[in-house]
Amino acid sequence: MNDALQGPGVALRSEALIALRRVALTAQTAPSLAALPGGFATRRKGHGLEMADVREYVAGDEIRHLDRGTTARTGRLHVRQFQEERDRVSLLVADFRPSMFWGLRRAFRSVAVAEALVLIGWNVVESGGRVGLLTVTATEPVIVPPRGRTRGMLDVIGGMVQAHDAGLAAMAARQGEDPPLDQALVRADRLVPSGAELIIGSGFDVPGPGLADRLDALSRRRLPRLMQMTDAQIDRMPRGRYPIRMADGRRLRLTLGGARDTPVMPTRQIAGRTALVLDAGEGVEQMARRIKAAFPVERAA
């Protein structure tokens, strides 16, 4: 492969993604910039098996939940409360189609998408959940079944690096084109159980005419979340016509730039759903703070 495609921000390195564990776990949550609706309560009171608390009895409480030790010690009726355990399963959907392999500053959008998804993945496994992977590519996808703990996250990282390397090689050889995203998501619901979340990291180029319907179908039993990776620098370029070479060798001139003072909005509507907007040019620490505000590990049910 061309040496230029092995540089920082272009090639995806497993050691760099593994190192993001520290960034993910130490990111300080700022006031929520774009909290997305929905979520998982990994610990909530219910009818589970793990005791959460002991409190005084009130009329209507289950007698079978009486805590004999506390009742005998205090002389007043006390009942136990239990935690309802929920297995958090997250499928990370990484868009590595040809349109993602470009960037104007720190990194290709494909690399930034991988970083953002890995930041989320590390938080999920560290909270006791399981993480899987589906890559969207111009050829065959890479699929990693959901697993927990560090081992599961390392499998996901290995799958990302494999798919990204294949995508870079195809781009260098001018092979492949963007398949519609809606078609690539057809198999997603078969990879995770009901109640799982699907976090889709993409530029949402070539979404396909049925993306809204596909997301609606997924949301019946699962929770799709959208994360759009942009490169805000393109709006800060001087307005003009820029030469672009297409994958098939054609050369075009596109009018770009001219919106220097336009801020990047933290959310955007895509296929009728709210998407968190991230900038591929910002640092991973800032990206981690934005993600942690929008995708907290625990939400009240």
Image (tube, rainbow, N blue to C red):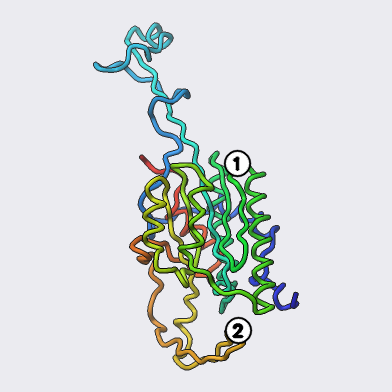
Q: Which mark is residue 148?
A: 1
- Residue wearing tag 2: 248
- Residue 256 shows which numbered tag? none
**Three-letter amino acid code of the residue under disc 1:** Gly
Give the residue drawn at x 75%, y 74%: 1
Q: Is residue 203 above or below residue 146?
A: below
Q: Nearer the viewer, residue 222 or 44?
A: 222
- What residue lies at 52% left-to-right and 58% top-to-bottom? 288
Residue 111 in the image, given as x and y percentages of width and height: 60, 67
Which amino acid, by three-letter code, is at mark 2? Answer: Asp
Q: Is residue 67 above or below residue 174?
A: above
Residue at position x 55%, y 60% in the image: 94
Residue 157, image x, y percentages:
65, 55
Q: Earlier in the sequence, mark 2 or mark 1?
A: 1
Q: Quadrant of residue 247?
A: bottom right
In the current view of this chain or complex, which residue is farthest to the left? 59
Q: Could you say whether the residue bearing mark 2 is in a helix, strand or loop?
A: loop
